[in-house]
Amino acid sequence: MHYRAIFISDLHLGTPGCQADALLDFLKENTSDYLYLVGDIIDGWQLRRRWYWPQAHNDVIQKLLRKARKGCRVIYVPGNHDEFARHFLDHHFGGIEVVEEAVHKTADGRQLWVIHGDYFDAVVQQAKWLAYVGDYLYEFTLKLNRYLNNMRGRLGLPYWSLSAYLKHKVKKALNYVTDFENAVAHEAAKHGYQGVVCGHIHRAEIRDVNGVLYCNDGDWVESRSALVENEQGELSLLYWQTEPVVIAKPQLVKVA
């Protein structure tokens, strides 16, 4: 498939949880005029603790660079796990642009604010030590999840995310997600944008928040999801399973 724009984030290259093989399949099968890397592409937090960099992760980087060389405009908005890249804002690396934030204009004229979203996470901004603890616990659930899915695979059962299940079951986590979405959408409205595209919380979503189109492209640790825009400017979420599953949402915010 060819799309006008593709948005992906939270790849977490450098961790065992990154589903690099599925991501490579996705990048090989889908092309676009614009490719936005919306933060947490490389997990500097984990790499500082323990070096992990298999060939598949290197292949992902090479694939992204190849797309830039072939004419795709690749725009990289660093997140909190790859905050080291924020030292190189407004630079180009192999044709990939590094920016603090971006504005994407859809084919039907809407302006979407593209940010990672960690600036709206009170834990990351005000209690970074707690964010590190949460990262340890999250990595543990992902490790447990890999064992569970190895067993499920032997039984012929499909992939299932333990950490996503736990987040949906914990009320405080749901409140955190809702507060995050509302804060990001509110700030986008203050800047005069019709919508916002972000990552950070690993929960893919397209919905209207008080007249602002809130889009989260998900992640490539659990959901294997991307936000895509077609040539008409319609946005949808694509989940990359054995066969890609597209979930389209009504476009609630239009430009007069």
Image: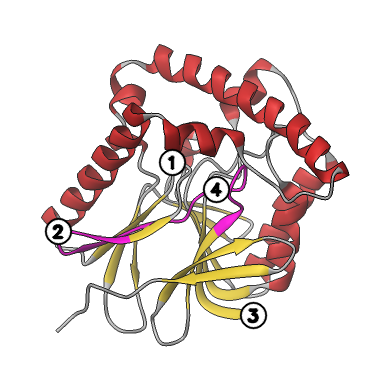
Q: Earlier in the sequence, mark 4 or mark 2?
A: 2
Q: Which mark is residue 1?
A: 3
- Tell me where residue 256 appears, x and y as whole percent: 14, 84
Amino acid type of the residue that numbered disc 4 sits on in the rendered structure: Asp
The residue labelled by disc 1 is 200
Q: CA distance from mark 4 to mark 2?
A: 25 Å
| Residue 56 x/y as whole percent | 81, 46
**Residue holding disc 2:** 210
Q: Give the residue at x 74% y 58%.
A: 24
| Marks 1 & 4, CB-CB < 8 Å contact | no
The magenta stretch is 207-225
User: As shown in the figure, which amino acid type bears the numbered disc 2?
Assistant: Asn
Marks 4 and 3, how far apart at CA:
20 Å
Q: CA distance from mark 1 to mark 4?
A: 8 Å
Residue 183 is drawn in which quadrant? top left
Q: Residue at x 22, y 73 (%)?
A: 253
